Structures are given as structure tokens and as C-alpha cells.
Image (cartoon, rainbow, N blue to C red):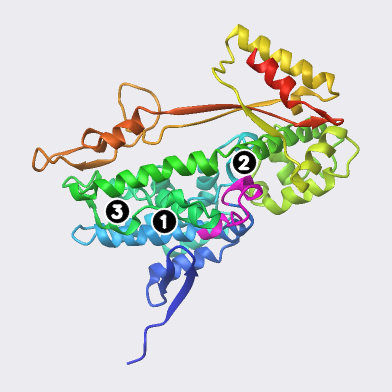
Amino acid sequence: MPAPKRKLIRDPVHDLIVFDLGSPRDVLLLRLIDCAEFQRLRRIRQLGMAYLVFPGGEHSRFCHSIGVMHLTRRMLELLGRDLQVPELAAVAVECAALLHDLGHGPFSHVIERFLHDNHEAWTRRIILSPETEVNACLRDFDPALPGMVADALAGKLTPAWLNLLIGSQLDADRFDYLTRDSLMTGVKYGVFDLERLLLMLRVDDEGRRVYVEAKGLLPVEKYLQSRYHMYRQVYFHKTVTAGESMLTAMLRRARDLAREGTCPGIARESGPARLIAFDEEATVADFLAFDDVVMQGWLAQWAECRDDVLKDLAGRLRTRHLFKTMEVENFDEQDMMVRMRVEEARDVVRAAGLDPEYYLLFVESEDTPYHPYNPRTEGAGTTIWTENPNIAGELCDVKDVSPTIRVFTESPYSIWRAVFPGTSGGKDLRDSVGKALQG
């Protein structure tokens, strides 16, 4: 009997990811991977500017997305074993897992403030656009599939628990990026017991909630600890913050020059330029033409341009001549005394011959390690459920049975940093800016 035909992808996190070429679902997933819109993710760094700090952090949204799809398939297999999962709904959630990051722009989250819509909205636009290869692929499989994939990403798929596999605080997306980013950066804080955690997941009788068995509480604690440390040590690293702030300042300068018609490489007829520089409705084609390669091309052009500010910022980013950062305590932008101190610091930068609009930046990095849903407050949150050890058959919030996790819900943190050049014209600015900001 001939062996089944298979396609293997070797992944540094999950080892071998196997596709059965006799399965229409797996063939569809492989076709989606080959689509131009998905291949573009090879040209979008997963960690944005973090490569400036962690030399191994060069991995892309492409490999992450395949990893999320793989974990979603495993979760479906484990959780759906004793449940009636509609075939097309299962296909939709696997496709949604694979395609969930199509809407990311260059350098990932940094660029979103210039794109009008967030990456989730762009992802849905790409999937629903009849002009994309991804849409055609999904329609070929079933005409209803593009809409179902978009619904899965919006949390509207039935049965409800399927949405949680790619949109919750215990989802395949977080499982993959924490594990992958930890491995690729060499930061060991992101390690947790993923295999045991997957085996501890269950679906409630109503098919609405995914919960963790009582004996899976320790892996959840470690998972949330890993998330906490990865944000503090990688995603909010001070030098990553400096690079992201400089990139934002550079794009603001480029946008202003482009609107005056004086920015090299930025023309109104250019799709990527329409996204960041002009208040015009950008098309899906405009968005898909924008990736890290385009941004690097702009950096090369701008590092040689006539505008001193744009030239300096682009040149610094290309050569990793980054600004310094300084934590600022009790920073409240509405406080009159804080505003006075900020103005004094701006005067210091201005006296050094620099424009504080681009050379004195203030950035807040904030996170709540675990944010359960609370109907009395605004904002999103998704509870992680577990079996109540005291009441058989009842589910409860993990924070109610774990003092460790309870601390996470009560410990949101916020770090304000001032970002500015360490020196200008041979003069050290750190002491003078620091004294101004500390009053």
C-alpha cells in the first residue's frame, strides 16, 4: 500500500508541521500559504524594531502565522474530539488562524498609527476583497468561507468556543508568539509548559467557554508569568522603545514634507505613500504594496536627502545610532508642573540646536499581565476559566483560585520614558534633560 503523500514544513518551534495532500482542508491551507498576500508576510518582521536589540529577532510574521495555524489545528483535534464541530466552521477557524496577521504593516505595530485602520481591520478587508488571491482561494473551497473566516477573526463564529482558539487570553496566537519570540531573541523568560497546557484545555457543556482543568493551574501561572516577563524584557525594552519612537518621529517628518511635495520617494500616486502621508482612502492593493522592504528603501533615500531632520533620523536608524531613554516618574501630561518641566527639557534640546518636536519624545509602555472581563468597566478582557476546586462542576476565574494570578490582575504597570539624543554637537544632554524633567 503506497504511503500517503504529505507536505512537511520544518519549524524551529514546533518541529515538523505536516500537511496531508489527500485532505482538501490541508490542500486549501497550502494554497493559502502560496498566495501573494500571505507570502508578503515574509517581508514583515514579527518584532518590529526589536532586531536592533536582539540579533536573532529577525523572524517574520510568515513563520509565526504558520505556527498559529499549527497550534489551532492541534487545539481543534484535542478539544473537538468529543464534540460535533461543523466541518466548514473547523476549516474557517484554521484558515483564520493562518491568515490572522495579513493586515500587519511594516515593522508590525509601530506603523499602525499612520494607517487609519488597525491590523485586524486590514486583515478582514484583505480576506473579503474579491481582488485578492486569498479571497479567491477561500471562495474556490466554498463561497461562504471568506465571510466565515472574517467572522472567526471578529469572534462571531458558531459554535462560540471556536473563536477563543484565535481570540482569547489562552489562544494559539499568544502561545506561538511567546514561545517563538523567546526562542528567537534568546530570552528565556518566555518559556512555559505549552504541551501540558494544551492537554489541560476543555470546552464547557454549552460550547461557549474553553477552560483549564484544575490540575492545569500551574501551567497557566507560568504562562502568564512568561507573558509578563516578555513584555518587560523584550517588547518594552528601552532600546526597542527608542527605535520605535525614532521611526515614528521620522515618519511624521516625512509625512509633513510629503504634503509639501518635498519628500524624496513619497509621491501622491504611490500606494504606500497614500497610506502614511495623505488623507486619502487607501485601497487593499495600496496596503499590500507596503512592507519592510519599502520602508528600508525609504530609509536609504532619506539618509541622503536634503532635509536635515529626516536625513539625521533615517541615518541614525540605518546605523543604529539610537536615542537614549530615561524613565520619568509620576508623568501626568495634564499636570501643570509636569508640563512646565517638559517645556524646560524642550528648551534644553532647543538650545542644543535640535527641534524638540522630533528630538524629545515621550512614550508610555503599559500592560496588564492578566485582564479578565469585567462588565462594570469599559474595555476588552477575556476571562481564563478553570474548574472550581471547591464546587464540583462549577467554573471560576483563575484569579479566584490562584494568588499568583490575582497579583497579575492587580498589578497593571506603566512606564513613561523620555527619548532623546544622548549628545548633540559633542555636548552631553542626559544630565541637563534629566534635571529639567525631575525638577
Q: Is residue 140 above or below residue 300?
A: below
Q: Amino acid at mark 3?
A: Leu
Report the residue marked by disc 3: 197
What residue do we see at 72% from left, 46% from top?
A: 271
Foreground of the two, 253 or 91: 253
- Could one spot residue 159 in this view of the protein? no
Q: SS at mark 3?
A: helix
What amino acid is found at the position of numbered circle 1 in the picture? Leu
The residue that mark 1 highlights is: 145
Question: Does residue 413 sit above or below 331 in this rendering?
Answer: below
Please rate how many residues cluster around mark 1, counting C-alpha atoms within 10 Å: few if below 14, some from 14 to 19, many from 20. Answer: many
Query: Dot 2: what SS?
Result: helix
Which residue is painted at 26% across and 34% down in the image? 403
* Magenta span: 46-63
Q: Nearer the viewer, mark 1 or mark 3?
A: 3
**What residue is pinned by disc 2?**
240
Does the magenta portion include 50?
yes
Dot 2 or dot 3, earlier in sequence: 3
Residue 4 placed where, x, y %? 37, 83
